[in-house]
Image (tube, grey):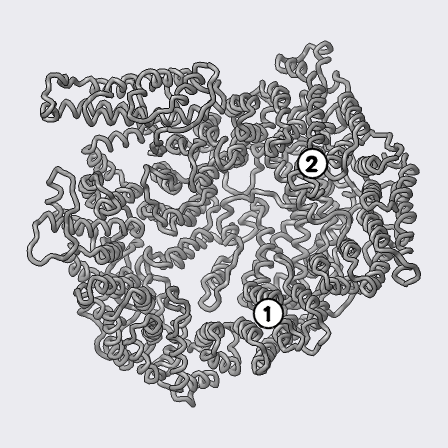
């Protein structure tokens, strides 16, 4: 699907994280740069499409052009050659992987012509019909990579056919035989493709069928949306109006609506300014709002469909962004309203499953707008559509957008889900409008930095300031005062270095490191006396920089305090581990990286002061070396670039270790800085490497390791934010002008450390003096010449390991002869040797080979003499891994650095301007990562004898007696398996030897090790499941035959579990291996073109005709060999299964393997078919289940093809409509079920054209309508045994045997899991296949069993016969008329019996049976079944349960027929209408569900005719007449109906209540299933629902009230048409309190605004005079108050309450006065007094909670109106409420807001909180 989008319409969401091969877009180059590039193009011979420019900044860049040209030439020549020789594996696969590696290393560094050839060739490979899935996925990933940069290839450069890709997806994603998941990704389809796609997929668009989802999915993936404007009439104009009206018409969120939204989002993004969305914008935003599934009210019931079918936020964001701007500005207006509606949900007090979606929206929308701005203003133009100037975003558009989203973002800063999304949103908003965004963030940050009691507030604000840091320090014309905030923020952040709060400590480190990276820490205060040309802000900045030194020293003091409190003595009990905990290691990392950043960025003067402070601290303290010592050593390392005194006297053990640790860390500096001290360092190593103390010699080994790394590796020596440092005079360079400045890619001035000859000599001197003697000692020990203790061996091995790790980049690779002929090939499969800047000195000894020889000898010696020395074995395993893999850096470390780089880049990047405007340190880091990527690229290495020897040793260790040794060796073994070509084929026989049944001397541990080696790790190679026939032919039988071993440890649970895991992994990961490795002729043509392409060209000779012919013969031989292997594997497994002594566990494993070998391109051998048939009656349930699935698949294999003929429905049955007209039309009416025109005779049956697929003809007819040919042209039915194939005869013999059938039925009717068994689709497929392939042959044998089962009331028997009957009905599809008639004579009595005997346990099985039987069948074929089901379903026979079950079964059958049975629907509705007054709840619920399906067809689509099926509006009108008695009464409706069907007449009201109960069930059922929301007539029921809902009784016992509330809740979630809104408001108007609630919501959403006229109107109503109490008689008070006056006064109070409650989280200036006005009415008569009290209770409770929260967020932010409010409320009226109030709470609140010192507060006895979270 992803590739279809890439090819068809473009990406809907760009990749968020760059990969190691991310490209660099550097445009607007200077003239010199342009000339440099031209010279390079001439030297290369072509213009590169888009290369990775970081390669050109490497120290060995001048050698890379030649290397890349050679590599590209080899790829082109060999890939073309492999294709022409038709060698798919290993040739094509090997060289396409090389191409992927090339793109990762160099980007798209090839010409446009080569690019087009690569795309075309790989596309043809992807869509080859019989390609293995695993190969297809590999080719697809490569194709996606080639197409990713869409601006590189225009439509003129490349066009690809869309149909092969569609056919391939149809074959795999919608396969009838193989259920495989495929996950892959899609501008280059021809102009005519759109019309062809519409013709192909529109006929699938039946809203009631699953094919609708399929059609819309295909449209979403394939439809081209990037056509140029002059071709729009061939593109989206063909479908846009139709699809947008479909989107608007179908309102109830069907599953496919999300796909439609994704399509519109892509269309909008690719065609900004070419589509007028204004007409649809209100409806679109309404849909967006609903898709968020926000809770409204206190008792909302969410419909599950709304949760599962919600829109993807990424696509919603793209659509919104693309609609912004333009002349009308309508999208921005609605976006502002949208955020006003949902703003309160972002308040920190709110939480729910919807919050993640809201936060994602907030995070992605600003990023999307920034991407659009970048495209409009900064991105280089390409062939893609240009946005018209009138639709580009203006400055005012940007301001409006930022203002609309600012408030929700500021609220989201303190969200319960964390502040990450808000920080990313603020980062992008600050790029557009820093002056609007940064000040409010700072307003929240300064108070947060002063509070000690709210760490969450501090971490949230700091993370948001980090997001805007670059915009803050850059200043610029929009926010010039920004930089002045930096120093105050840094100084106030220092207390955050707090050892007691880990999260606060880490965010503070990140905060300080971020600002230090952006700003040179140079004291510029002296400039004020030297220069007078500075602006006011610059003068202020220069003055402030005098504090930098204080900041650095204070930061160091904080760090020292942190270190002192982190010592082991402080943080551990004596018994605890001495290792660093995870948190401590993170703090160490944060401290060292932050301190290093500060020292990198500070001036020399500040650096020297810091250095002295570190030195004094390190030399006056001694720490343990595990935790605190490591932290100090890290600080010393950061300061060690000018550290020149490292030698001290060592006396005490602790002091010696401490100094060794310091020394080992401070030697991690530039190699040339170490050379002056080499003599002293060598002396120290000589004295310490052989210390007896293990901790001592490990630290000495680290020193040796760091010395070698520092002198041999290539790395940048500085990461300063400005090239050349800060040492220049202020007259020529002013550091404050570089705050936040990005690095210039072409003027980075990277200072590289490249090993000098002196450093290399020093490194070899260290190896000669320290490695060579150890190797010699270990050699003697291995030869038995000397004895070494275990500690000595471990010590020597540690020295060897440190030498190897330190000099890994210096030592040449292992040499030796390659092992050939592991895989048969006509190609050369050479290793990729990349330049990494190291010139290997072949004249010196290759210590890598020497280490390999000695370690191998030592290993075998140890395994013989001291196998239990596991510590030394661990080191040997590590050394072996490094020998095989290590070239200077480790993959896991690189991945960690890459991830860290991305996080930092994300937090500091400027996506608006683009062009890699990153800070200099980040760019240097990226260049270094590019170098490491090159050193780590070890794919496709040649497999040599030395590798083989090491791998065999690793295998030996992987089967050791010690589990930890096995585990560590296996990890290294698995990593190496993926590195060397075809090594698996060499090693599998060795692994399988441990499983050989005749080997008696295999231990349990060896067997476990071998099984783990076969199993592999979670993401590596699984030896038991390689996609290679040669391997699995050996592996699978070996696994099974191991069960025959006398030494098998099956009593051990761990061994049994391993075999289970192995079988389960094979089943889960196995993908069908190909038998046909053919390559299409089109591929061969493209391969020849690629081989002949020049610039660069390979030095390979073109293939001769003989070689090409040889390739063809080789391919044929490979196909034959694969087929032989397939049959051999089946035969071998069957031979093993024939052995009677095979344990049951291995028998089941073998049968499982056998079932994996079923395929749709080659039939299963007859012997295997016979085995599976016999296994249907196996004693073991698990075997029977596998056999049922297998036999069902075999039936599919043996299915005979049936001929189809094409008909034209328009010429036969009606004229073609001028436009697409979905629904019932004259030309599709012949498909309807018509009882007066059913095929009841043989002639009518054979003349009838049956169309089985129910979706054909509803929307439109397919281009070719195929129906089955007449019976005389179909395969023969009623065949004798002699006319059958051998495989069919085997099946026929078994299923004709009464004993076999009796045993089979006995097993099938057994209970499996009581209470959990369900209708089994696999058993159904088995019987369907039997009756389809053999027609009536087995019916006589099965009929007696069916008769017995149908009369058996046990659920397992009923389920079994239901599966048989469903299989029979579906299997008789091609039977002759006479056989069908005979079948129904048998089935009809069976079904009547079954329906009369139906039970609670079996009703769902019979419903599934009938629904399955009716699926994809022409209803005219099943007319006997439908007529049978329509026979009085509510007869009362069997009670209410039987009635409900009969309706359920009928509903299952009718629902499958969708729109084709209008007559049956009308008949059923006519039958049900008089029976709607049922009192039995289960019958009512079922009738409600049936009514939903009856009216589901009543849907209005664009251009559709009214349906012939029942209309919901007509039905509702009839219902309303019957409910009139209830509508006319004024009082509330009570449920007083007795639960029984009364005999005789009942009054109208009783009948109406019974009817209403059924109608409520219908409304509830239809809310989640129908395609449109409530129609006008249904809305007329709302007044009735309002009369029921407020009834005061327990809703748990009152079904009527509960259903009414549920209906109101569900109806409130539906979309309303504009004309329906008036109706709803009219209904609500009748309920004053509901009208007030609605008004409050409208005010909160800003649909209405609170103005003076509204306030004065309500205040005037409030002043309506009522008679005084003393003038009224107490006994008749309610009667003496004029009702109109009371209503008017109550309306005024409700209006004021609505205004107050519309601001749940803020206090507008008008609110205190309104509250004071309301308090006057506290003693008014009911219901006024209740309304007033409730309003005050809610608002007071809200404000206290919110304001106490805000107190913790800083009292400075609380407006004066809030203080007035609380003052007024506390003193004025709260004491009058009827709720218990905590006096301490009042005292605290009063004190807080009157700035007094508050007493301690216990938050108890608060009134219950009302739900005020309303989006409106």
Tell me residue 1433's x, y (percent): 20, 65
| Mark 2 nearby-residue class (10 Å; few <14, some 14–19, many ≥20) | many
Q: For the residue labelled by badge 2, is the local secondary structure a helix, a strand or a loop?
A: helix
Q: Nearer the viewer, residue 1356 or 1703?
A: 1356
Is any atom of residue 1561 visible in this view?
A: yes
Tell me residue 681's x, y (percent): 89, 38
Q: In which quarter of the image is residue 1743?
A: top left
The reply to whether callout 1 and callout 2 are in contact (CB within 8 Å) is no
> In the shown orientation, is residue 1625 left or right of residue 711?
left
Residue marked by disc 2:
588
- The tag earlier along the polypeptide, 1 or 2, is 2
Residue marked by disc 1:
1078
Q: Quadrant of residue 546?
A: top right
Q: For the residue labelled by badge 1, is the local secondary structure a helix, a strand or a loop?
A: loop
Q: What residue is rendered at 53% in x and 55% in y? A: 184
Tell me residue 857's x, y (percent): 85, 62
> In the shown orientation, is residue 1395 left or right of residue 232?
left
Q: Is residue 20 above or below residue 1285?
A: above
Q: What residue is rendered at 47% in x and 32% in y? A: 412
| Mark 1 nearby-residue class (10 Å; few <14, some 14–19, many ≥20) | some
């Amino acid at each position: 699907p992803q590739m279809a989008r890439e090819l068809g319409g473009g990406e809907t969401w760009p990749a968020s994280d760059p990969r190691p091969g991310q490209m660099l877009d550097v445009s607007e180059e200077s003239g010199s740069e342009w000339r440099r590039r031209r010279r390079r193009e001439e030297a290369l011979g072509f213009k590169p499409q888009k290369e990775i420019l970081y390669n050109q900044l490497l120290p060995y860049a001048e050698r890379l052009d030649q290397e890349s040209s050679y590599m590209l030439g080899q790829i082109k020549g060999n890939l073309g050659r492999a294709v022409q020789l038709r060698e798919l594996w290993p040739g094509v696969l090997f060289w396409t992987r090389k191409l992927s590696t090339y793109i990762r290393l160099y980007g798209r560094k090839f010409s446009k012509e080569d690019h087009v050839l690569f795309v075309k060739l790989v596309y043809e490979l992807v869509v080859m019909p019989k390609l293995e899935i695993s190969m297809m996925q590999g080719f697809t990933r490569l194709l996606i990579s080639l197409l990713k940069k869409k601006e590189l290839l225009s439509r003129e450069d490349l066009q690809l056919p869309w149909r092969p890709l569609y056919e391939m997806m149809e074959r795999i994603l919608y396969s009838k035989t193989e259920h495989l998941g495929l996950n892959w990704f899609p501008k280059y389809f021809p102009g005519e493709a759109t019309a062809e796609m519409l013709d192909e997929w529109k006929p699938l668009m039946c809203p009631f069928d699953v094919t609708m989802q399929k059609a819309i999915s295909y449209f979403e993936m394939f439809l081209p949306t990037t056509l140029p404007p002059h071709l729009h009439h061939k593109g989206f104009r063909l479908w846009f109006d139709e699809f947008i009206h479909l989107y608007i018409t179908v309102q109830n969120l069907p599953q496919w609506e999300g796909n439609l939204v994704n399509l519109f989002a892509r269309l909008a993004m690719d065609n900004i300014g070419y589509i007028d969305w204004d007409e649809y914008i209100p409806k679109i935003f309404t849909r967006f709002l609903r898709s968020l599934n926000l809770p409204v009210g206190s008792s909302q019931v969410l419909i599950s469909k709304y949760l599962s079918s919600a829109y993807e936020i990424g696509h919603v964001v793209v659509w919104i962004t693309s609609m912004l701007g333009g002349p009308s500005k309508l999208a921005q207006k609605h976006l502002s309203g949208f955020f006003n509606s949902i703003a309160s949900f972002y308040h920190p007090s709110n939480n729910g499953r919807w919050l993640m979606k809201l936060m994602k929206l907030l995070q992605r929308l600003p990023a999307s707008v920034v991407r659009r701005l970048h495209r409009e203003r900064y991105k280089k133009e390409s062939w893609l559509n240009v946005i018209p100037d009138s639709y580009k975003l203006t400055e005012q558009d940007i301001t409006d957008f930022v203002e609309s989203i600012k408030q929700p973002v500021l609220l989201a800063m303190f969200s319960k889900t964390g502040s990450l999304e808000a920080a990313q949103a603020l980062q992008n908003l600050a790029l557009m409008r820093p002056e609007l965004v940064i000040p409010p963030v700072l307003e929240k940050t300064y108070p947060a930095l002063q509070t000690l009691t709210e760490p969450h507030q501090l971490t949230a604000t700091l993370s948001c300031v980090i997001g805007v840091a670059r915009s803050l320090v850059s200043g610029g014309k929009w926010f010039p005062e920004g930089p002045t905030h930096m120093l105050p923020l840094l100084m106030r952040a220092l207390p955050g270095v707090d050892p007691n709060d880990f999260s606060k400590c880490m965010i503070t480190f990140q905060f300080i490191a971020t600002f230090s990276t952006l700003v040179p820490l140079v004291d510029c205060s002296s400039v004020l006396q030297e220069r007078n040309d500075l602006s006011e802000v610059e003068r202020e900045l220069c003055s402030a920089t005098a504090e930098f030194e204080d900041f650095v020293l204070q930061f160091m003091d904080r760090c020292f305090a942190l270190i002192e409190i982190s010592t082991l003595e402080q943080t551990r009990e004596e018994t605890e581990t001495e290792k660093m905990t995870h948190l401590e290691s993170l703090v160490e990392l944060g401290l060292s990286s932050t301190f290093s950043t500060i020292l990198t960025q500070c001036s020399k003067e500040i650096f020297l002061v810091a250095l002295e402070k570190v030195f004094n601290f390190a030399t006056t303290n001694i720490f343990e070396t595990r935790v605190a010592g490591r932290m100090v050593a890290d600080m010393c390392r950061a300061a060690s670039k000018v550290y020149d005194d490292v030698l001290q006297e060592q006396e005490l053990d602790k002091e010696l270790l401490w100094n060794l640790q310091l020394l080992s860390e401070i030697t991690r500096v530039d190699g040339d800085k170490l050379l002056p001290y080499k003599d002293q360092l060598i002396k120290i190593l000589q004295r310490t490497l052989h210390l007896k103390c293990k901790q001592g010699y490990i630290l000495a080994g680290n020193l040796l390791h760091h010395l070698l790394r520092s002198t041999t590796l290539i790395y940048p020596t500085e990461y300063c934010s400005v090239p050349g440092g800060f040492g220049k005079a202020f007259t020529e360079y002013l550091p404050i002008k570089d705050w936040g400045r990005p690095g210039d890619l072409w003027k980075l001035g990277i200072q590289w450390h490249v090993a000098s000859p002196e450093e290399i000599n020093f490194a070899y001197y260290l190896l000669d003096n320290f490695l060579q003697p150890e190797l010699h000692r270990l050699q003697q020990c291995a030869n038995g010449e000397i004895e070494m203790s275990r500690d000595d061996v471990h010590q020597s091995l540690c020295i060897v390991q440190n030498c190897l790790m330190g000099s890994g980049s210096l030592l040449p690779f292992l040499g030796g002869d390659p092992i050939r002929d592991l895989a048969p090939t006509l190609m050369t499969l050479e290793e990729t040797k990349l330049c990494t800047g190291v010139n290997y000195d072949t004249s010196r000894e290759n210590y890598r080979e020497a280490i390999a020889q000695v370690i191998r000898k030592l290993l075998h010696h140890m395994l013989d003499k001291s196998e239990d020395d596991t510590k030394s074995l661990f080191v040997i395993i590590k050394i072996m891994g490094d020998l095989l893999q290590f070239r200077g850096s480790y993959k896991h470390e690189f991945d960690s650095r890459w991830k860290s780089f991305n996080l930092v880049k994300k937090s500091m990047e400027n996506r608006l301007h683009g062009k890699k405007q990153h800070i200099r340190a980040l760019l240097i880091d990226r260049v270094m990562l590019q170098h490491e990527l090159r050193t780590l690229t070890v794919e496709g290495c040649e497999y040599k004898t030395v590798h083989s020897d090491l791998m065999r040793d690793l295998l030996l260790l992987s089967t050791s007696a010690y589990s930890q040794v096995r585990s560590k060796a296996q990890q290294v073994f698995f990593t190496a398996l993926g590195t060397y070509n075809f090594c698996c084929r060499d090693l599998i026989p060795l692994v399988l030897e441990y499983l050989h049944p005749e080997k008696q001397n295999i231990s349990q541990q060896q067997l476990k090790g071998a099984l783990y080696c076969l199993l592999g790790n979670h993401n590596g190679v699984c030896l038991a499941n390689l996609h290679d026939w040669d391997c699995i032919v050996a592996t699978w039988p070996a696994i099974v035959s191991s069960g025959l071993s006398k030494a098998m440890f099956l009593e051990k649970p761990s061994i049994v579990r391993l075999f289970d895991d192995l079988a389960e992994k094979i089943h889960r990961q196995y993908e069908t291996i190909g038998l046909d490795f053919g390559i299409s002729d089109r591929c061969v043509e493209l391969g020849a073109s690629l081989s002949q392409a020049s610039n660069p060209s390979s030095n390979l000779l073109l293939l001769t005709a003989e070689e090409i012919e040889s390739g063809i013969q080789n391919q044929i031989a490979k196909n034959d060999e694969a087929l032989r292997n397939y049959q051999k594997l089946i035969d071998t497994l069957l031979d093993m299964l024939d052995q009677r002594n095979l344990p049951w566990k291995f028998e089941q494993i073998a049968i499982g393997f056998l079932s994996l070998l079923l395929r749709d391109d080659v039939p299963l051998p007859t012997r295997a078919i016979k085995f599976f048939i016999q296994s249907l009656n196996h004693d073991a349930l698990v075997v029977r289940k596998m056999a049922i699935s297998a036999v069902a698949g075999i039936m599919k294999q043996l299915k005979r093809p049936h001929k189809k003929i094409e008909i034209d429905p328009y010429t036969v049955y009606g004229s073609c409509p001028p436009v697409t007209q979905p629904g019932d039309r004259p030309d599709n009416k012949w498909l309807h079920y018509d009882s007066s025109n059913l095929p009841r005779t043989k002639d009518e049956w054979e003349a009838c054209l049956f169309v089985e697929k129910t979706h054909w003809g509803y929307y439109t007819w397919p281009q070719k309508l195929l129906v089955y040919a007449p019976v005389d042209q179909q395969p023969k039915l009623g065949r004798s045994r002699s006319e059958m194939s051998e495989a069919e005869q085997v099946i026929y013999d078994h299923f004709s045997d009464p004993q076999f059938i009796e045993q089979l039925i006995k097993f099938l009717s057994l209970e499996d899991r009581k209470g959990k068994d369900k209708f089994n689709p696999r058993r159904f497929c088995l019987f369907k296949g039997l009756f389809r392939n053999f027609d009536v042959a087995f019916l006589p044998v099965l009929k007696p069993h069916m008769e017995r089962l149908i009369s058996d009331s046990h659920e397992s028997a009923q389920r079994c016969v239901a599966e048989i009957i469903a299989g029979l009905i579906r299997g008789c599809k091609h039977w002759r008329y006479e056989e069908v008639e005979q079948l129904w004579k048998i089935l009809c009595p069976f079904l009547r019996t079954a329906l009369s005997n139906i039970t609670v346990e079996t009703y769902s099985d019979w419903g599934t049976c009938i629904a399955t039987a009716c699926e994809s069948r022409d209803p005219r074929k099943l007319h006997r079944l439908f007529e049978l089901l329509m026979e009085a379903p509510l007869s009362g026979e069997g009670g209410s349960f039987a009635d409900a079950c009969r309706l359920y079964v009928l509903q299952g059958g009718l629902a499958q027929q969708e729109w084709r049975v209008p007559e049956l629907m009308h008949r059923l509705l006519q039958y049900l209408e008089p029976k709607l007054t049922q009192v039995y709840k289960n019958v009512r619920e079922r009738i409600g569900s049936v009514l939903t399906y009856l009216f589901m067809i009543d849907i209005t689509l664009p251009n559709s005719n009214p349906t012939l099926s029942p209309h919901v509006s007509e039905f509702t009108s009839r219902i309303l007449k019957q409910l009139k008695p209830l509508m006319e009464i004024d009082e509330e409706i009570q449920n007083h109906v007795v639960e029984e069907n009364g005999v005789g007449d009942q009054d109208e009201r009783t009948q109406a209540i019974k009817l209403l109960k059924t109608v409520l069930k219908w409304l509830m059922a239809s809310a989640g299933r129908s395609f449109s929301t409530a129609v006008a007539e249904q809305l007329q029921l709302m007044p009735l629902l309002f009369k029921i809902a407020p009834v005061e009784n327990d809703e748990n016992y009152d079904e009527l009230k509960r259903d009414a509330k549920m209906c109101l809740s569900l109806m409130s979630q539906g979309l309303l048409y504009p004309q329906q809104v008036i109706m709803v408001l009219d209904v609500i108007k009748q309920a004053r309190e509901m009208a007030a609630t609605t008004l409050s919501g409208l005010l909160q959403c800003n649909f209405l605004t609170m103005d003076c006229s509204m306030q004065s109107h309500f205040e005037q109503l409030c002043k309506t005079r009522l008679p005084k109490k003393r003038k009224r008689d107490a006994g008749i008070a309610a009667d003496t108050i004029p009702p109109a006056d009371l209503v008017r006064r109550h309306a005024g109070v409700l209006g004021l309450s609505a205004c107050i409650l519309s601001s749940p989280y803020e206090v507008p200036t008008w609110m205190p006065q309104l509250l004071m006005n309301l308090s006057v009415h506290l003693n008014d008569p009911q219901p006024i007094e209740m309304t007033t009290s409730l309003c005050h209770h809610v608002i007071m409770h809200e404000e206290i909670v919110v304001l106490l929260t805000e107190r913790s967020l800083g009292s400075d932010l609380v407006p004066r109106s809030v203080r007035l409010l609380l003052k007024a409320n506390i003193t004025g009226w709260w004491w009058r409420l009827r709720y218990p109030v905590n006096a301490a709470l009042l005292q605290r609140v009063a004190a807080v807001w009157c700035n007094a010192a508050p007493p301690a507060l216990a938050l108890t006895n608060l009134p219950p909180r009302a739900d005020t979270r309303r989006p409106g």
